[in-house]
């Protein structure tokens, strides 16, 4: 004996809406992963990190991008990375990105002013990143390369 159960048309729409919401949530979750071999993406991520850290003082966002964030409490991290002094950062731009397996090295050009020096200075910063759990994560210690 077969039972044919038909859902009334009015009750179908909430089911359709729920399916759409679930699909959209899955798409958003997929966006949170980074492509390991995409130098442009890693360069953009490094620029975003350093802009937040040195220009916007958004230390919480930077902390969330750190590889070893669990080993250092946020209060300690903030003390380590807060930008003390009167140096004014003007810009952070990616110069070059090198990716080898799960390790990335981003070279950034940082333009800044130091009072009372009247001219703009520039420094190249080498920044290490590690691909871990589907995301690029920042390695805390940068490499200062040269001042021009």
Image (cartoon, helix red, strand yellow):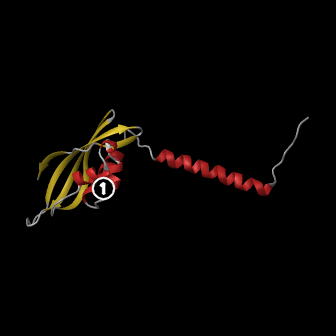
Q: Which residue lies furthest to the top in this view?
A: 101
SS at badge 1: helix
Please name whichever residue, 93 or 62, is drawn nearer the observer in this view of the structure: 62
Please tell me whether residue 85 is drawn above or below residue 130 in the rendered image: below
Horizontal arrangement in the rendering, residue 108 relative to residue 38 (left or right) = left
Q: Disc count in the image?
A: 1
**Quarter holding the N terminus?**
top right
Badge 1 crowding class, 10 Å Cα cut-off, few under 14, some 14 to 19, many 20 or more, is many
Horizontal arrangement in the rendering, residue 40 relative to residue 18 (left or right) = left
Q: Residue furthest right?
A: 1
Residue 51 appears in the rendering: yes
Q: Where is residue 126 in the image (x, y as percent from the top left)?
A: 21, 44
Please name whichever residue, 54 or 73, is drawn nearer the observer in this view of the structure: 73
Q: Position of residue 24 (x, y in %)?
A: 57, 51
Horizontal arrangement in the rendering, residue 65 relative to residue 116 (left or right) = right
Task: Write down the residue under mark 1.
Answer: 59
Q: Which residue lies furthest to the left in this view?
A: 117
Residue 39 appears in the rendering: no
Please name whichever residue, 38 or 90, is drawn nearer the observer in this view of the structure: 90
Residue at the (67%, 54%) spot, across then down: 17
Quadrant in the picture for residue 5: top right
Residue at the (26%, 61%) spot, across then down: 55
Horizontal arrangement in the rendering, residue 72 relative to residue 116 (left or right) = right
Residue at the (15%, 61%) spot, across then down: 85
Q: Where is residue 111 in the image (x, y as percent from the top left)?
A: 18, 58
């Amino acid at each position: 004996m077969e039972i044919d159960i038909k859902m009334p048309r009015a009750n179908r729409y909430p089911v359709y809406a729920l399916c759409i919401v679930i699909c959209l949530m899955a798409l958003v979750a997929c966006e949170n992963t980074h492509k390991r071999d995409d130098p442009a993406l890693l360069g953009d991520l490094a620029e975003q990190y350093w802009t937040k850290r040195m220009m916007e003082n958004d230390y919480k966002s930077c902390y969330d991008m750190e590889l070893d964030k669990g080993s250092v409490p946020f209060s300690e991290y903030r003390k380590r990375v807060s930008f003390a002094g009167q140096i004014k950062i003007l810009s952070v731009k990616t110069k070059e990105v090198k990716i080898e397996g799960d390790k990335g090295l981003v070279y950034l050009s940082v333009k800044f002013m130091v009072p009372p020096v009247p001219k703009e200075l520039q420094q190249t910063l080498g920044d290490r990143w590690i691909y871990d759990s589907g995301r690029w994560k920042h390695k805390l210690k940068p490499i200062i390369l040269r001042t021009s």
